[in-house]
Image (tube, rainbow, N blue to C red):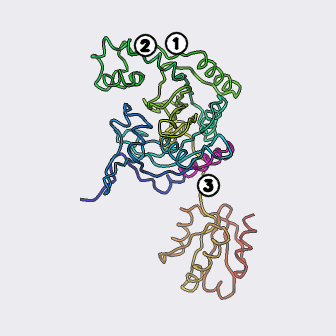
Amino acid sequence: MSIQIPRGTQDLLPGQTEIWQYIEKTAREICLRYQYKEIRTPIFEHTELFLRGVGDTTDIVQKEMYSFQDRGERNLTLRPEGTASVVRSYIENKMFGWANQPVKLYYIGPMFRYERPQAGRFRQFVQFGIEALGSKDPGIDAEVLSLAMSLYKELGLKKLKLVINSLGDKESRMAHRNALIEHFQPRIGEFCGDCQNRLEKNPLRILDCKKDHDHELMKTAPSIIEYLNDESRVYFDKVKQHLTDLEIDFVEDPTLVRGLDYYNHTAFEIMSDAEGFGAITTLCGGGRYNGLSEELGGPETPGIGFALSIERLIAALQAENIELPIKKGIDCYLVSLGEAAKDYNVKLAHQMRSAGITVEKDYQDRKVKAQFKSADRLEARYVATLGDDELANDKINVKFMETGEQVQLELATFVEQFKKLQA
């Protein structure tokens, strides 16, 4: 029996990888404008990082992590998300002492979660995310949202919906927590086992339950908005004012809680409204996580960020029938006629590539007609034909495939002449 790819993973083949490269290049260029610098953290971390950072009541920690013991009996986990790793690195490398504050970082890399594979969701998936650490200015909340929306719009997506909420500060969350416990306690037996376990530990997570989403108590649950203190209300109003000033449309949703324990104040999701995109519409999620640094043993550090799945982004592009402007084709295909010409073209291809020209040649001793067909498949803009006679006369024939125009160039100076021909 042949060995097949593990469930929930995918091979990205030529033709697909160019799409990924274009998206990643666009993301990096936008981060440069906003002055976010790339960070690369390990694929695996100590399991405790995610227990403390993500929260032991979350679905990620309880059900989805790939954890194992190494030969030294250390408990390790393939990273299920990026924020905890970035904050760990921020603390460990004492970035809080850097001259430029806040510290603005981005990452692109694979994450791992053991969940049911479905359209646009995989067990190994790639996230692009940003983290801004060291500022509690609501202006940077707006900046983070602006960066996310800019990426989607620059890639051509139009059917987007930004949903925001405030989870309040510690005082507001505690008041809301007590109200939720009082609300759900009398009938908690009607809920799933996960919700029953979360009632005392983190009742806010009950609102994010997929199994009991339609329970009548969900519809009447106390809203966090009702329990925001004055400071939290002023903060949230300021974020919304900034978004209005930036002409970024948004919808307020007091039921939005996000799935990770570390969020407070601003929380948000960006969704696709494209027809046929699927039942799960979320493209991107994030929010503010003041207190996470302290939870991981670092100094008091406010932070905010988001993460988005590249797979979900590509699915949204497909739903809106958007074709990215990816450069196709090659500059030149070298056709060889005769053994001496074939040998010479090995050197000529190297010279052209060294000069920045994209080149391919035949390596299968195909006939001339088959070589031209190969050039067509590769969408070569020019075909340069070299035979033994041309080689003897220090000449090479060049055909511009779009018009059929042909010229003969000196072989000794061909690379320089070809670059002029392209211009």
Residue 226 circle label: 1
The kind of secondary structure element at disc 1 is helix
Q: Earlier in the sequence, mark 1 or mark 3?
A: 1
Label 2: which residue? 179
Q: Are marks 1 and 2 in contact (CB under 8 Å)?
A: yes
Secondary structure predominantly adopted by residues drawn in magenta: helix
Instruction: Note whether 327 is above or below 351 in the view shown.
Output: above
Instruction: Note whether 342 is above or below 132 in the view shown.
Output: below
Q: Earlier in the sequence, mark 2 or mark 3?
A: 2
Q: Select label 1 or label 3 by which is in front.
A: 1
Quadrant location of residue 130?
Answer: top right
Label 3: which residue? 327
| Horizontal side of residue 51 vs 404, given as left or right | left
Q: Position of residue 70 (x, y in %)?
A: 32, 54
Disc 1 versus disc 2: distance between alpha carbons? 10 Å
289 or 65: which is nearer to us? 289
Disc 1 versus disc 3: distance between alpha carbons? 52 Å
Which residue shows up at 44% across the image and 32% down it?
Answer: 260
Q: Residues within 10 Å of mark 1 (few under 14, many from 20)?
A: few
The kind of secondary structure element at disc 3 is loop
Give, as a single range, the part of the protein colored magenta.
Answer: 19-38
Which residue shows up at 52% across the image and 27% down it?
Answer: 264
Q: Position of residue 101 (x, y in %)?
A: 66, 41
Q: Is 163 a magenta residue?
A: no
Q: Select label 2 or label 3 by which is in front.
A: 2
Quadrant assignment for the C terminus = bottom right
Outermost residue toward the left? 1
Q: Select label 1 or label 2 by which is in front.
A: 2
Amino acid under label 3? Lys
Outermost residue toward the bottom? 392
Disc 2 versus disc 3: distance between alpha carbons? 56 Å
